[in-house]
Structures are given as structure tokens and as C-alpha cells.
Amino acid sequence: MDQKGLLIVISGFSGAGKGTLVKELVDRYGYSLSISCTTREPRAGEVDGVDYHFKNKEEFERLIDYNGFIEYAQYVENYYGTPRKFVEDEMAAGHNVILEIEVQGAINIKKQYPDAVTMFISAPSAAILRERLVGRGSEDEATINKRMKRAITEADSMPVYDYIVINDDLEDCVNQVQSIIVAESSKSKYKEGFMDEIKDELQSV
Ligand code: 5GP
């Protein structure tokens, strides 16, 4: 069966728990996580090649010129881009690939790959979103306010996503996203190899 992998795009408000969700999906189900390139400075604890491929502006722009990204966007004065080779190779090998990207990137991906499954992760309410940002303890009041402001514009983009997933409880959220992935990859259009095989087998029993 030569089923190609699914392209799964995950976006969401800062503080919605995307990072933890994606980590769980990768750990539990072995999905391939695309590591983006960025020109922003690494945060404390971030590792080059693990969290991001950290590049300077010149390196990033050279990669743009070489068609090295399937999408890239400018976000808060920095570039972020999804490396083309990793994603294309993994999908061709039949692996499901997760991209954790912002909305411009999600729209761009959907144009190029209409079969991509796009999901927007939200906290159950604005109050809980703020609570989670405060609870992280990693951002000051001004940064939290900036992120909450940004969430207002991000909310306008929610209708472009295929699915809205509310992250109230992590376990429920992981299960919900996994159910979506299983349902999407069970569509008959991805099962041609299986359908041909079983038809042949039925002829010979
Ligand atoms: P952060 O700087 O907080 O790690 O990421 C900022 C935003 O950039 C997040 O919304 C994240 O999902 C998004 N992002 C990360 N990598 C990419 C990418 O390759 N392409 C796009 N379009 N957005 C990305």
C-alpha cells in the first residue's frame, strides 16, 4: 500500500497548549514533526536543530531564493519557514507530518496542498487563555498583553481552518486531534492501494 502521508497543520493562540499537544502526538503516534527555520533569537533552553533551525537573515533569504521552503512568513519582525525537503520526503515515505505554524503559513499550505488538514487550537475561554499565559511565568505583563491583543486578530482567522479544537483538558485534546487524523486518513481517496489489493485477493480465494 503506497499511501502518502497526511500533512497536518496546527495553529492556535499563544498559551493554548499547542507545544505540549504536538509533543504528545509525536511521542504517542510517531508523527514526523517539521522543524522550522527562523531568524529570531533562541530563547533560554532552546536548541538549534531541535526547536528550530536558527538562521541569520542572509542565510534565510538564500534559502528563500533556492526554493528551500514550502512556505514562509514574517511574524513579529522575524522570518519563519517550513523546510521543503523534510516535508516532501516524509510525506512521500508515507509518514504523517505535523507543521506547527501561524495563520499565514496555514493559508499558504492549504493553497498548495488542498488535502492538508488544518486545525486551530484554542483555550476554552479568553480568561483561561490569560490565566495560562500568566501561569507559565515566562512572560512579563506587557508581553502577555501583547499576546492577548494578537489573539484578537488571530481569532478572525479561525474560520479558514478545517477544525477548531478546544484544549480544556490535554488528554481529551490529544484524543480529539488523533480522532481527526484517523478519520482523515481513512478517507477512501487515500485507500486506493488497499482497495485494489483486496479486490485482487478476493479474486483468488
Ligand atoms: P515562536 O517565536 O513563539 O516560537 O513562534 C511564533 C509563531 O510562529 C508561532 O505562531 C509559530 O506557530 C509560528 N511558526 C513557527 N514556525 C513557523 C513556520 O515555519 N512557518 C510559519 N508560517 N509560522 C511558523
Image: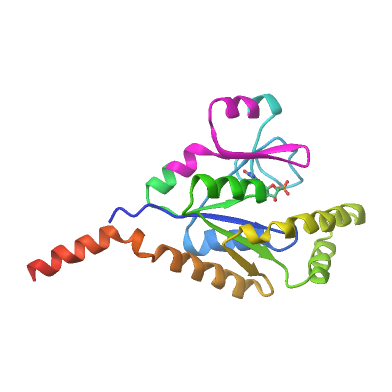
Whether residue 75 can be seen here = yes
* Residue 34 horizontal/vertical position (percent): 55, 47
Question: Count the marks: how many?
Answer: 0
88 in relation to 138, above or below: above
Which of 42/172 is in front? 172
Whether residue 34 can be seen here = no
40 in relation to 159, above or below: above
Quadrant for the N terminus in the image? bottom left
Verify whether residue 123 appears in magenta. Answer: no
- x 47%, y 37%: residue: 85
Which of 141/50 is in front? 141
* Residue 198 horizontal/vertical position (percent): 20, 66
* Residue 41 horizontal/vertical position (percent): 75, 38
- x 63%, y 49%: residue: 101
The part of the chain drawn in magenta is 60-88
Outermost residue toward the right? 141
Quadrant for the C terminus in the image? bottom left
75 in relation to 125, above or below: above
- x 44%, y 42%: residue: 88
Outermost residue toward the left? 204
113 in relation to 18, above or below: above
Horizontal side of 111 relative to 168 (left or right) equals left
- x 24%, y 63%: residue: 195
* Residue 197 horizontal/vertical position (percent): 20, 61
Q: Which quarter of the figure has residue 64?
A: top right
